[in-house]
């Protein structure tokens, strides 16, 4: 059998009850803050903002990598232009712009 006798004095028991009430009140206050609609909305906003920041950061890294790869195609290690690659692309761009210009004139006229 377990010993169920309590050797505490009434003052010790009252102090223990007061401590437990204080802890319970603090816990209830924390729960109240956590379930408050403003807290829930704030937490949701923070999670969305963190997700957006993470997604934007990943997109930035991806775009930066692609830009670096494209740049490497047109610039040599010393920073000079690779004319054998720049000229054909420039001619192609001029041709496309010219086609759009001619096509736009035909529709107007």
Image (cartoon, rainbow, N blue to C red):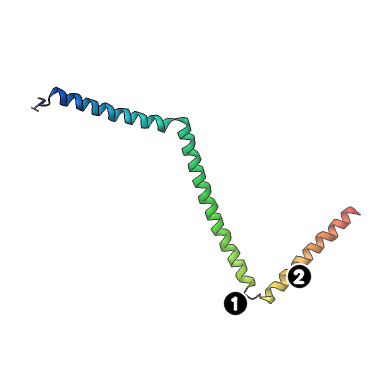
Q: What residue lies at 53% left-to-right and 54% top-to-bottom?
A: 57
Give the percent coordinates (x, y) of residue 41.
49, 35
Q: Considering the numbered disc 2 on the image, is that residue within a helix, a strand or a loop? A: helix
62 left or right, relative to 100: left
Q: Residues within 10 Å of mark 1 (few under 14, many from 20)?
A: few
- Closer to us: 11 or 7: 11
91 left or right, relative to 105: left
Position above or below: 1 against 94: above
Tell me the mark number nearer the camera, choosing from 2 and 1: 1
Q: What residue lies at 58% left-to-right and 59% top-to-bottom?
A: 63
- Closer to us: 103 or 76: 76
Q: Considering the numbered disc 1 on the image, is that residue within a helix, a strand or a loop? A: loop
From the image, tell me which residue sits under label 1. Answer: 78
- Closer to us: 101 or 57: 57
Mark number displayed over residue 91: 2
Give the percent coordinates (x, y) of residue 94.
78, 66
Q: What residue lies at 54% left-to-right and 59% top-to-bottom?
A: 61
Give the residue at the far top of this rendering: 10
Give the percent coordinates (x, y) of residue 98.
81, 63
Quadrant holding the N terminus: top left
Quadrant holding the C terminus: bottom right
């Amino acid at each position: 059998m377990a010993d169920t006798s309590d050797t505490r004095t009434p003052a010790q028991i009252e102090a223990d009850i007061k401590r437990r009430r204080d802890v319970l009140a603090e816990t209830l206050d924390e729960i109240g803050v956590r379930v408050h609609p403003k807290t829930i909305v704030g937490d949701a906003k923070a999670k969305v903002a963190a997700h957006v920041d993470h997604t934007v950061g990943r997109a930035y890294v991806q775009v930066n990598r692609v830009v670096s790869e494209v740049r490497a195609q047109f610039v040599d290690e010393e920073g000079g232009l690779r004319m054998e690659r720049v000229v054909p692309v420039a001619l192609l761009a001029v041709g496309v712009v010219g086609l759009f210009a001619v096509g736009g004139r035909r529709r107007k006229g």
